[in-house]
Amino acid sequence: MWNRVNAVTANDMTKPAIPAVGIDLGTTFSVVARLDEHGQPTTLINAEGDRVTPSVVLFDADDIVIGKEALKAMATEAEHVAECSKRDIGHRVFHKVFQGRQYPPEVIEAWILDKVRSDAVQQIGDFSKVVITVPAYFDEVRRKATQDAGYMAGFEVLDIINEPTAAAVAFGFQQGFLDEAGGTREPRRILVYDLGGGTFDVTVMEIRGTEFIALATDGDVRLGGYDWDQRLVDLVAENFIREHYVDPREDPGTAGKLWRECEDAKRTLSARSKASVACDCRGFASRVEISKKQFEEATQDLLDRTRFTTEQTLKAAGLDWDNIERVLLVGGSTRMPMIRDMLRELSGKAPDASVAADEAVAHGAALRAGLLLAESLGEPPAFSIQNVNSHSLGVVGTDRLTNRRRNGILIPRNTPLPVTGKRTFTTSKAAQKSILVQIVEGESPSADDCTEIGKCTVRDLPPNLPMNSPVDVLFHYEPNGRLQVKVTVPKTDRTVETEIVRENSLSKEHMDGWRQYICGKEPTDYR
Ligand code: AMP
């Protein structure tokens, strides 16, 4: 069944073959995969000959360098290097300034995507249609920013899918669930524990033959291997300060090199009981030995945060560990033995590392791209994905008693998509002329602790509209993250319909400018 995309296009000589490409745009590393002529997902090798590309950008005096070379530059010129830009995505600008300029994080992500695109073109020829993955816990703002990055890198983004879902699809493919012969109708429930370089996601999935249904998802967009690195950096730095009264973290020339050394030591500690880190700074030098026990003690709270979230997610899915058939490990950081031990203890079963931790997500994305391309050629879908929303969506209302801004939730988190939610609010004053509807994303009852994702206004209300007149708000939320909002004031003819356009986002004009600059491609229609 998977051969069809390639088979149909390859046999029809009038149409060029369209490769099915998926990209895992990771915080620390990115991976590109395609479906080969047998419909098998395979990882593409980059220009440096590696399967993964560091998601790092170096702003050199007269050049922009992406990937391995940029990562190396962390050791000597960290101040010119943008690393972990995925963590800043959704913010207006990246937290560092380069040559007096601050870039939007999605522009930095676009450079990374452009690098992996041009490397892939060398192998499979020109292509533009891709599926890009995001953490399940990414909110609407971050999803849209990722899509924008894809556009600025010259892609036509077919879909943005959740990393754990992609991993589950790759797992299902590997297990033969997606073949007509191997497919099973018996539901299998798996928990995907995905700890990458910068983000943590946990998702409970049900696989029913070729249907992949997310039951609950949770996570932390600021928790990943990078935080474990940081703890090692702190351990070494504290040791260095005790010996030499100098803090190597404060020396820009040393900090980047120290971080690289620590990241290396962390990997060593996944295989050995101790590792050593060399540090020299301002004429002083030390070699610090760190034991696995010390490392695990220093990072215990990070582990506990993932444990707590994992338990909460299982609870949100209404399940317990007996209902979970497998705990699937995804993301490079799940190689740390402390993660595996914790999950074994928690679930009572050995975690499953059968999918390639670094590559499964890109493979799932390529399978999804194959599905979408086949569908566009009139093929029946080979599998389906059902997602849930990872954050509640609501409207800001005012509490009459306290006068505080409250979050009136219309669509609670973990609701299967697509979904329509409706709620009735009331006007706060007599003879109100207009109604401002502010749409927020988040769990807190206080609107101030949530993220505003858009707003719309109902104007020209009829005169003398009494106080407490009903205002119906309707949300329709699609699996692609698009939110349609309809506000109606019953007993009047006033209705406003809008699709949420992200505040803070780059204008189409800006994006077209960046697209030209980054990849030299002409503007196209873009949502
Ligand atoms: P990913 O985003 O899935 O590519 O994961 C990257 C993260 O995995 C980085 O923080 C790496 O330092 C971490 N990582 C990769 N291999 C290992 C290993 N053997 N032990 C510990 N962490 C690792």
Image (tube, helix red, strand yellow):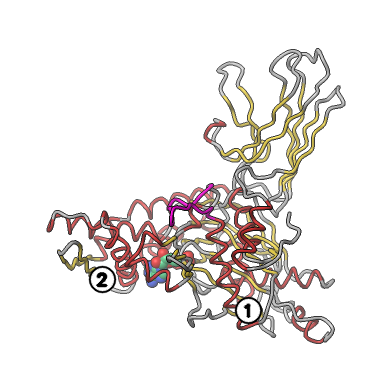
Residue 484 in picture, x, y percent from top left: 75, 43
Residue 82 in picture, x, y percent from top left: 44, 60
Instruction: Examine the structure image and report whether residue 104 is included in the region drawn in magenta.
Output: yes
Contact between marks 2 and 1 (CB within 8 A): the answer is no
- Judge whether 429 appears above or below 297 on screen: above
The residue beneath circle 2 is 273
Residue under the point 32% across and 67% down: 76
Q: Quadrant of residue 211?
A: bottom right
Instruction: Examine the structure image and report whether residue 336 is included in the region drawn in magenta.
Output: no
Can I make out residue 40 in this image?
Answer: yes
Nearest the camera: 508 or 463? 508
Question: Dot 2: within a 10 Å radius of its alpha carbon, few (fewer than 14), some, or many (20 or more) residues?
Answer: few
Residue at disc 1, secondary structure: helix
Relative to residue 126, is residue 290 drawn left or right?
left
Q: Which residues are magenta?
A: 92-105
The residue beneath circle 1 is 121
CB of mark 2 near ligand 1 (< 8 Å)? no
Q: CA distance from mark 2 to mark 1?
A: 42 Å
Residue 392 in picture, x, y percent from top left: 61, 41
Q: Main secondary structure of the magenta part?
A: loop
- Judge whether 349 appears above or below 428 on screen: below
Question: Dot 1: within a 10 Å radius of its alpha carbon, few (fewer than 14), some, or many (20 or more) residues?
Answer: some
Residue at disc 2, secondary structure: loop
